[in-house]
Amino acid sequence: MREIATGITKDTTLYISLSGRPGNTGTRFHNYLDDALGLDFVYKSFTTSDITQAIAGVRGLRIRGCAVSMPWKHDVLALVDEVDASAAAIDAVNTIVNTDG
């Protein structure tokens, strides 16, 4: 597996998770698979005390995608531009795809 710190360039695509209690399992899993598939992506998990500002950061920094965990799965519905029918049906978001902000 690549060394994350040495494999990141200005062209590396960042995608993240927002979780109330972030862990390392998802980070290791996603970064291992990105490396195995030869993708220039890096995945990092975060927590926040302000979900509105965190989603604004995803937009403003052009972070490609964002996994959403509890406690924000419902709250982010009001913060995205489009909601997929499946997310609307369960009144919760699991993944945000950022396409040009």
Image: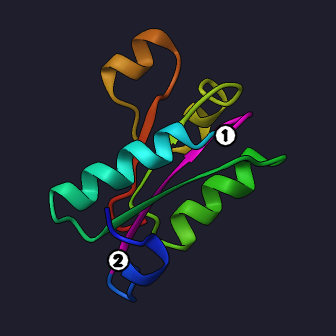
Q: Which amino acid, mark 2?
A: Thr
Asked if residue 4 lies in the magenta stretch, the reply is no
Label 1 belongs to which residue?
22
Whether residues under marks 2 and 1 lie with C-beta atoms below 8 angstroms apart, the answer is no
Q: How is the image coloured?
A: rainbow
**Residue 34 picture location, percent across and down:** 26, 56
- Is residue 21 toward the left or the right of residue 57 in the image? right
User: Residue 12 shows which numbered tag?
Assistant: 2
Instruction: Say what amino acid the circle numbered 1 marks.
Output: Pro
The residue that appears at 52% across and 64% down in the rendered structure is: 59
Badge 2: residue crowd in 10 Å (few <14, some 14–19, many ≥20): few
Label 1: which secondary element = loop
Which residue occupies the foreground of this view, 84 or 24?
Answer: 24
Q: Is residue 33 left or right of residue 55?
A: left
Q: Quadrant of the C terminus?
A: bottom left
Identify the magenta region: 12-22
Q: In the image, residue 55 lies at what x, y percent? A: 61, 53
| Observer-nearest of 21 and 71 | 21
Q: Give the number of the disc on residue 34.
A: none
Give left or right: position of 85 versus 60. Answer: left
User: Residue at the location (37% across, 55% down)?
Assistant: 31
Queried whether the magenta region covers residue 17, the answer comes back as yes
Work out whether 85 lies above or below 50. above
